[in-house]
Image (spheres, grey):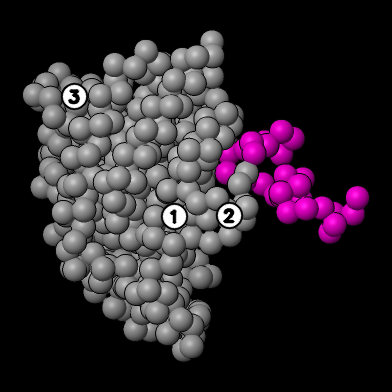
Amino acid sequence: MNSKELPNLAFDQKHIWHPYTSAVNPLPCYEVERAEGVMLELTDGRQLIDGMSSWWAAIHGYNHPHLNTAATQQLSKMSHVMFGGLTHAPAIDLCRKLVDMTPAGLERVFLADSGSVAVEVAMKMAVQYWACQGSPEKHRFISPRNGYHGDTFAAMSVCDPVNGMHSLFNSVLSTQLFAPAPQTRFDQPWNEDDIAPLIELIIAHKHEVAALIIEPIVQGAGGMRIYHPEYLKRCRQLCDEHNILLICDEIATGFGRTGKLFACDHAHISPDIMCLGKALTGGYLTLAATLCSEDVALGVCAGDPGVFMHGPTYMGNPLACSVAIASIELIEKNHWPAQVSEIETVLKQNLLALKSHPAVQDTRVLGAIGVVECKQAVNVAKLQKIFVEQGVWIRPFGKLIYIMPPFIIEPAQLIRLIDAIKLGLDAIQGSAKC
Ligand SMILES: *Cc1c(COP(=O)(O)O)cnc(C)c1O
């Protein structure tokens, strides 16, 4: 059959790459027709409660009138103009808000086009900063294991070297320095031993290290681990003490997800460089930002070449900036703390208990994030099918079944997500290995 005549899903399977899937034997896909609030509607009419916020992004839900209006109003003026030599109110107003709302000291904003690019930009800033201070040997990065920072090359080099999905590229990646992942859980008593290996690593390598890069409080795609704020506090102190920059990757955690506006706020720290993405546009358009301190910005531009050498074609895209402003306006209405806290309560009451399920290794909750870690890697296709049949959208990976729903989800809908997970776990337990 001619490709043009293939039905949609068959064409998709034959011609289109999806994230982290095989071109030969791809996982099944479901075709979405529209989305509204917390619901995804498939082309066959089935309605799914969304447990993923389209990967941490759609915090206000889909098809939101305020975000729609922002996009259409901006569209009637201009969807894009180059950012080299030109500027515009959408970028300016967005950056005003970002400088204002992020932890103290982050004064300069670089608008990037995706989270991975924001991480590349942060790492380039750190390397260029030290080169311009006359310390070009400080070009390596320290990161805790179980991290995830994106899929481009520099970002890959600081992802977990084992589970980071990138071991194939080891020969072309810069070799970075990895500390053990933080072990003390968010609500456990702090254990001083937890920081000892990082101290050792920093002392041994500080002469060659540009920055420590870390996901604050919640390690996302590298294992969905939630750690003690004291660890992050100590990272800040160690970086200050040993002349290393601190990069906090808030791409997943930013904009309220963990119960604080930014996860850094749990530890009351400001990084030297911060990466934002995902929920920045409320899940509408791809946009990310790298913020840095005045010291970093001046340092980067102090020596030769005197400029920061990065400039994406779609930098500061007005359409994306306008929607981001609208998304932040919704955050400023300040309904999110109560919404996230209610989600956290329901998750703690209902999802944590799944720990006693025989298929489950561990359960964890923080803010609007719920994690079920299974004893074995799960069969994604089979679980996904069960979830869709239950009327929910949850996408597991590895051993992890996790949810981070839009903040507007109702408790009854959240319970349906958790019930579906329970049913999925029963199926896992029922078969030898799901
Ligand atoms: C998703 C993510 C990235 C990469 O963002 P993309 O927009 O997918 O490139 C980087 N860091 C963290 C912590 C993330 O969760």
Of residue 176 and residue 57, the one placed in the foreground of this image is 57
Between label 1 and label 3, give the one nearer the viewer: 1
Q: In this view, does 139 lie above or below 58?
A: above
State the image quarter where residue 215 is shown.
Answer: top left
Toward the top, the furthest residue is 432
Label placed on residue 45: 2
Tell me the residue that label 1 is attached to: 39
Q: Residue at x 22, y 39 (%)?
A: 346
Q: Distance between the residues labelled 3 and 2?
A: 45 Å
Label placed on residue 184: 3
| Label whose residue precedes the other's in the sequence (2 or 1) | 1
**Lateral position of residue 388 relative to residue 197, left or right:** right
Instruction: Identify the magenta region.
Output: 1-28
| Label whose residue precedes the other's in the sequence (1 or 3) | 1
Q: Residue 167 at what x, y percent from top left?
A: 54, 28
**Lateral position of residue 381 relative to residue 110, left or right:** right
Q: Residue at x 46, y 27 (%)?
A: 424
Residue type, label 3: Thr
| Label whose residue precedes the other's in the sequence (3 or 2) | 2
Residue type, label 2: Gly
Q: Does the magenta stretch include residue 27?
A: yes
Between label 3 and label 2, give the one nearer the viewer: 2
Q: Which residue is drawn at 53% across and 55% down?
A: 41
State the image quarter where residue 229 is shown.
Answer: top left
Between label 2 and label 1, give the one nearer the viewer: 2
Q: Is residue 344 magenta?
A: no
Q: Residue 164 at what x, y percent from top left?
A: 47, 31
